Amino acid sequence: MAQNWYERHVLPLLIDLACGSAPMREMRRQVVPTASGKVLEVGIGTGRNLPFYDAARVHSLVGVEPSLRMHRLTRKRSQQAGIALQLVGLSAEQLPLADASFDTVVCTFTLCTIPDPVAALREMRRVLAPQGRLLFAEHGRAPDAEVAARQARMNRWWSPLAGGCRLDRDIPALLDAAGFAPQLQQRYLPGPRVVSYHYWGEAVAA
Ligand SMILES: C[S@@+](CC[C@H](N)C(=O)[O-])C[C@H]1O[C@@H](n2cnc3c(N)ncnc32)[C@H](O)[C@@H]1O
């Protein structure tokens, strides 16, 4: 899809900045270190999770990220973390990867942005080995009707500014629709309530 100047030059920097916030770092700290074996990270962005991997547990890491402008910073962070990374510049809805070929799939703060999140989650389930785990941390639809209504209203202007991010994705419903059985925690993190309701945990194929 053609990108305008803002999307090409400003958005990658803004996304990197926003993804470095303290509450997001705390989410990453809770889910990423348990990744093990052959790991796939979907929507790896600028590699904000890379410092949180336990290099001793990760045998290999493939990162899928369609925004090629982010790849330079992602590569730099993988070198700093001492983790060899194979980067794939494609979308998550159609992964060019073999069935049952990963032990762990990591997906953080990305289901908000993927245009077809159920298709992407089905692909994640397909490439996971039978006992494989999906580790996730995502913001999404708030449980309070008033906040959820505000999220739905704000999407109209928020989404174009934030690279397609939707504020009100129903994360448990998406996981369920894609055939995952999640163990998740959810609550508001510090920050404006429209963007701070989070879901995190792990899931296996149902
Ligand atoms: C808010 S950023 C989060 C980046 C990273 N996951 C993190 O935790 O910092 C959302 C990411 O989803 C990526 N993305 C958007 N559409 C995608 C798609 N169809 N498949 C895979 N990634 C996608 C964006 O390019 C961006 O890097």
Image (spheres, helix red, strand yellow):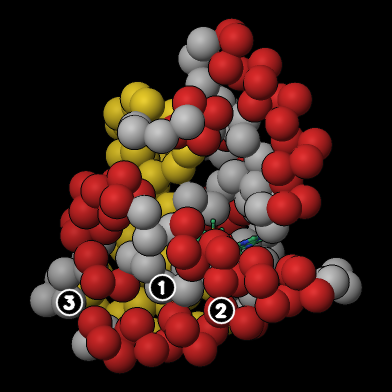
Label 2: which secondary element: helix
Q: Dot 1, how many residues are within 10 Å of its Cα: few (below 14), some (14-19), or many (20+)?
A: many
Amino acid carrying label 1: it is Gly
Residue in front for this viewpoint, 186 or 23: 23
Q: Nearer the viewer, residue 4 or 97?
A: 4
Q: Which mark is residue 55?
A: 3
The three-letter amino acid code for the residue at tag 2 is: Met
Q: Helix or strand or loop: what does disc 1 sit on?
A: loop
Mark 3 beta carbon near ligand 1 (under 8 Å): no
Q: Mark 1 or mark 2, which has the lower sequence index? A: 1
Q: Quadrant of residue 186?
A: top left
| Rendered image: mark on residue 76 | none
Q: Any atom of ligand 1 within 8 Å of the CB at mark 1?
A: yes
Tell me the residue that label 2 is attached to. Answer: 70
Q: Which residue is mark 1?
A: 47
Mark 3 burial class by Cα count in 10 Å: few <14, some 14-19, many 20+ = some
Instruction: Name the residue at 72% across, 53% down.
Output: 161
Whether residues under marks 1 and 2 lie with C-beta atoms below 8 angstroms apart, the answer is yes
The residue tagged with tag 3: helix, strand or loop? loop
Report the front residue among 168 and 87.
168
Question: Which amino acid, mark 3?
Answer: Ala
Packing grade of label 2 (10 A; few <14, some 14-19, many >=20) is many
Query: Which residue is drawn at the image coordinates 71% and 31% (left, top)?
Result: 154
| Quadrant showing the C terminus | top left
Q: Is residue 82 above or below residue 198?
A: below
The residue at 38%/60% (across/down) is: 20
Between label 2 and label 3, give the one nearer the viewer. Answer: 2
Identify the image quadrant of residue 90.
Answer: bottom right
180 to 100, vertically: above or below: above
Q: Position of residue 104 (x, y in %)?
A: 33, 60
